[in-house]
Structures are given as structure tokens and as C-alpha cells.
Amino acid sequence: GWNRSFGGRLATTGVLIGVTMPVYMWINHTVRPRFDLSVPLDSYIPFLPWTIFIYLSFYVLLLTAAALSSPDDYGRIQKTVLAANFLCYGGFILLPAHYPRPLPQEAGALEGIFAWLFSNDAPGNTFPSIHAAASLCVGFGLKRWPWRLWGAAVAVSILTVKQHFILDLF
């Protein structure tokens, strides 16, 4: 099948992103946030603009899984990521929350990246975080500590780029 070669796994990754992104964006721009999921600990987590590069490396992590996985492991990872996406969609619909993000200007030299992110991704779709769930699925699915560390770093970056509440991480 498709997943026997790197090119096939890469194509599968592209198709899965192409299928899930419109669903995500539809929910993000249609479902009105109604809940505040903040807890006191959220206010102590600093805004660290440079961690946007870790946050965005999520997509590179998906491609890394395509490159490094065996066909069987890749299939398992992708099924898990797809299941995580649809579980998160359920959360977005049942418990829509709005994260109060900083102004892009607060990111200093990275203002343009944050302006782009915030203009393309409304501040809803927080609970639970697809970025956290999928990056942990991929990181742990690759079965080596550097990939697990990368997945965990992406998961934590959802907090330091101020895209998610701490509850969204769980």
C-alpha cells in the first residue's frame, strides 16, 4: 500500500492534513466560544514568543514520522493522530472556549508570525489541544527519547505561545 514507501507516507500525511484542516477551520470559525477554562496557574505561564518555532515545528514532526517510521508504525501513528483529532473536535463543539491571546505586537520581532497565526486561527478550539495530543502521539509513536522530547516540547509550547489554557494540555 501507500505507506510502504516514504513518498507514500508523505502523501498520506498530506491527505490527512488536507482532510482534517477544513474540519478544524469550520469548527473554529463556526462554533462560538462560551466557556472560560482558565485556572490561576494560567496567569503564571509566561508569553515566550520564540517558542512559536517549537509550536509550528508540529508539522515538521508529522513529516518526521513519515520519514522515520516503519510502514506498520506509521499506520498506527496516523490512526492515533486521526482519532485524537476527532476526539478534540468533540471537545471543541461540546466545550467551546476562547483563549484571551496577547496582541501580536507583544511578540516584538515575531509580530508578523503571530499576526499571521492569529488571523488564520481564531482563538477558539482550545479544549483539548490537537497540537498537544497529536504531537505526543507522534513523539511517543516514534519510540525514541529525542522524538518524545520534541513531542512534549510542542505540547508545552501551546501554553507559552498563549494559544491554550493549561487544561487544554490534559
Image (cartoon, grey):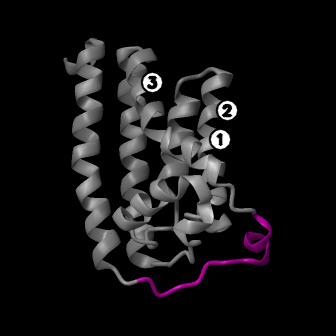
Image coords of residue 56 (percent x, y): 49, 44
Q: Which secondary structure lies at badge 2?
A: helix
Image coords of residue 122 (percent x, y): 40, 71
The crowd level at tag 3 (other Cα within 10 Å; few <14, some 14-19, many 20+) is some
Identify the image quadrant of the C terminus.
Answer: bottom right
Which residue range is magenta in the image? 33-45
Q: Is residue 61 left or right of residue 45?
A: left
Image coords of residue 71 (percent x, y): 35, 16
Q: Which residue is mark 2?
A: 149
1 or 3: tag closer to the N-terminus: 3
Q: Which residue is mark 3?
A: 64
The crowd level at tag 1 (other Cα within 10 Å; few <14, some 14-19, many 20+) is many
Assign the magenta stretch its main secondary structure: loop
Q: Is residue 16 magenta?
A: no
Camera-side residue of 71 and 131 = 131
Indicate whether 66 appears above or below 81. above
The kind of residue tagged 2 is: Leu
For residue 24, what is the image quadrant? Answer: bottom left
Q: Which secondary structure lies at badge 3?
A: helix
Which residue is at 29% across, 63% downward? Answer: 25
Q: Which residue is mark 1?
A: 153
Q: Is residue 36 left or right of residue 85?
A: right
Instruction: Give the number of marks.
Output: 3
The kind of residue tagged 3 is: Thr
Camera-side residue of 79 and 152 = 152
Q: Which secondary structure lies at badge 1?
A: helix
The kind of residue tagged 1 is: Ala
Indicate whether 150 appears above or below 9. below
Q: Residue furthest front?
A: 109
